[in-house]
Image: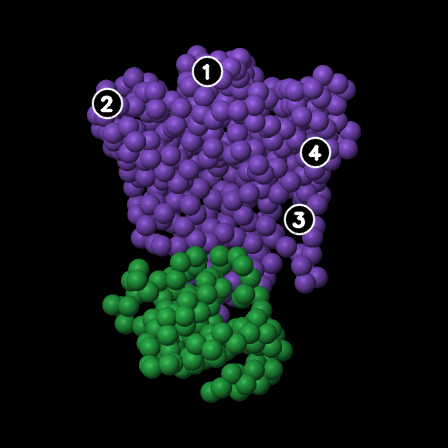
Amino acid sequence: MSIDDLIDNFAFFDCWEDKYQYVIDLGRQLEPLEDEYKCEQWKIKGCQSQVWLVPQFNDSHIHFRGDSDAILVKGIIAIVLLIYNDKTKDEIKRIDIAQIFAKLGLEENLTPSRRNGMMSMVAKIKEYADMI
Amino acid sequence: MVKVSDCGADIMYDANKIRNDFPILAKKINNRQIYYLDTSASAQKPFCVIDKMHYIYTEAYANPHRGSYYFADAITTEFEKARQTVAEFINARESREIIFTRNATEAINLVASSWGKDNLRSGDEVLISEAEHHANLVPWQQICLATGAKLVVTPVDDNGNFLEDEFIQRLSSKTKMVAITAMSNVLGTVFPIEQITEQAHKAGAKVLIDACQFAVHNHIDVQNIKCDFLAFSAHKTYGPSGVGALYGKAELLQKMPPYQFGGDMIDNVTYERTTFADIPARFEAGTPASVQAIGMAEGLRYMTNLGLANIMAHEKELTQYTLMRLKQVPNLKIVGQAKNRGGVFSFAIADIHPQDIAFILNKENVFIRTGHHCAQPIVNRMGYTSLARASLGLYSTTEDIDALVEALLKAEKFFREN
């Protein structure tokens, strides 16, 4: 599924319940991280729930795997990974995450509050991109 | 409803009417009523507090204790009247036993740092409970690390009950300070602070009470408790943020060295040395949060006018109602079921993350707290990394609780895997 497919899918929802039920489904479909990765090394700081992000560097691209103990956050992680996965450093830098989340109608998840730490996760992705 | 005797006149304590005193509670979000159940984190403010602060800024503002002109005199009078009001609220003997701080955390830091530096040595012990907020844990832990004293922790049982025998076992002549909460912000447990103080004094220890949660819901009398120090913050007692109070027995405060240095806490300054002012000024370096302190007094006056006994009776009744209603949510477990407890309810629903619960509740305009509640050790001790928490204030109603339960039922269904 591409991000454009996802935006199309989200356009069908006319209430927040259906929209977030779909986010939960995306979270449940996300391949869970093995317990060995759920450690301090891969933990994203500044989230109210526990969030882990593991990069795999493939030449000029990065593939991320992520997980959380909160299912809504896990769903949001699934979307963030769909947006950022298997991209080059330059592609990652060019992504306007706020704009995509606005199109999805999920902009409330990008507040600077510590609630779900999405901004911390995006910052970490960019930090990993700089390592390429 | 509960009978209120205010100025001798019997009126009914009607929380629905009292809500009208709090402008924010009338705010609608997405055209729907809001349900504020996070008073334990911070209370909402009545008009009288907001109006009083507005009055000071528009009619009587200057830097207190510095100028000798109309505004300076006016605010100094109000500021010192505020100190008197705080003293009366907790029944301190005299107003100079009240130090205005930024918040309760700073009040405890002041004691840990100033009293601790002078009185703690290697081999001494500081005794705290397992249910302390970080504010009454980390300052003691750090002063222990600096002085070589030992931090000793007395446990609670699985329901959050204070265990007197365990406490007494840990008390000894080594114990120099017992720093304990009067009411847990996670478990809602009310601690027997009079007995704790008596036992601690018998062992020769000083006692500091963290009354942040307790002050919101209960009458405080420091002369009855006999504690040496007590800390609470304005923002939880219906006053503004940015100010708190430390009570200390005058004879102890007078012996303590200054905590911070600067303006108005001095007596005489030369380049070589400084002599310091008497209490309370000695502990109030720099321009104080004067308008906030005046607002704090107004919040306390508001509580006093409603009647602490009436607030307590109302919240007690609502606590029973909440406990009864929460039982109706499938798989909900209340964390903290002490016999003596107040209107603070931490809970978990099966293995649904509290943050997920709070997300749905927020959508339903039900505002609660989630996370570790700045008390990680007790949250972990109860077997969690994060908890959801609803808490009552003097304006809370059964309607708030009904909305909470309805939203929890929705959340439980929403996240249940089918």
Numbered mark located on residue B174 in the image: 2
Identify the coloring.
by chain
Residue sitting at the far front: B271
Q: CA distance from mark 1 to mark 3?
A: 55 Å
Label 2 or label 4, whichever comes before in sequence order: 4
Residue at (54% x, 66% y) in the render:
A109
Q: Report, in whole angstroms, how far the alpha carbon at label 2 lies from the one at label 4.
A: 46 Å
Is label 4 in a helix, a strand or a loop? helix
**Residue B397, percent from left and from top:** 60, 47
Residue B151 visible within the image: yes
Does label 3 or label 2 sit earlier along the sequence?
3
**Residue behind mark 3:** B25
The quarter of the image holding the C terminus of chain B is bottom left
Point 43% across, 80% down: residue = A88
Note whether B269 is above or below B42 in the view shown: above
* Chain that the image shows in purple: B
Residue B376 position, x and y percent, is 36, 47
Marks 1 and 2: which is nearer the front? Answer: 1
Label 3: element kind: helix
Determine which residue is flagged by label 1: B272
Measure the C-alpha gap from mark 3 to mark 4.
19 Å
Q: Which numbered dot is residue B53?
A: 4
